[in-house]
Every structure is written in C-alpha cells, then in structure tokens.
Image: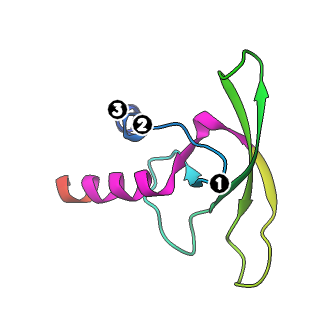
Amino acid sequence: MNTLLKKIKAAKNSRVGLGDVVTFNTSIPFIQGRTPWGTIVEQVDRGVTGQHLLCAIQWFNLPPGKRGNITYHYENELLRLDEKLAYDALKDSVV
C-alpha cells in the first residue's frame, strides 16, 4: 500500500490552481457519481509563501442545477482530475 501511495504522488505532475477541477490524491480509482470532485474557487496562502496553499473547493456531487458545498483542503491532498484519470487508466492497463 505504501508503494502505491508513492506512485500516486508521482502521478501529480503539476500544482493545482484557481479554477482547476480536482479530486483527492488517493489510491482509490475515480468512479463518477461516487468519488468527490469539484473546482477550486479560492486559494489562501498559509505559512511560508507558496509552500502551503489552502484551497476552497466547490464540490459537484449534487444533482444538476444545485450548488455543491464548499470545503477547504491543502494543495498536497488534491490532484487535478485529468491527471487522476490518466493515472487510473495507466494503472488499469498495467495490472
């Protein structure tokens, strides 16, 4: 499990930014309708400048037409959705 988490960390190619569609950086594959995903609507610099970014995420896990709730998570816990989907596809093709 530990080696899988190290590989997942390597799947993160870039930092997340304002407006990016993100999900959590986990070893669990992305499943539409179950896995939380959302867009970053605010970034707050915490601690040393540029080192710890707290991101406000508006989640898309509600029916269409309704706004999702907003929660805050650190940038290192998040992964861009396109990178997560590419990593899941690569992992499935290897296994």
Whether residue 53 is in magenta: the answer is no
Q: Which residue is mark 3?
A: 3
- Upstream in sequence: badge 2 or badge 1: 2
Q: Which residue is mark 2?
A: 5
Question: Residue 18, position in %: x, y?
Answer: 66, 47
Amino acid type for the residue under numbered disc 3: Thr
Whether residue 87 is in magenta: the answer is yes
Asked if residue 17 lies left or right of residue 58, the reply is: left
Question: Residue 88, position in %: x, y?
Answer: 35, 56
Q: Is residue 36 above or below residue 79?
A: below
In the image, the segment drawn in magenta is 73-91
Amino acid type for the residue under numbered disc 1: Gly
Q: Residues within 10 Å of mark 3 (few under 14, many from 20)?
A: few
Residue 73: quarter of image: top right
Marks 2/1: CA–CA distance:
26 Å
Residue 61: quarter of image: bottom right
- Which of these two is toward me, 5 or 68? 68
Seen at 81% across and 63% down, the residue is 69
Seen at 37% across and 34% down, the residue is 10
What secondary structure is marked by label 3? Answer: helix
Q: Which residue is mark 1?
A: 19
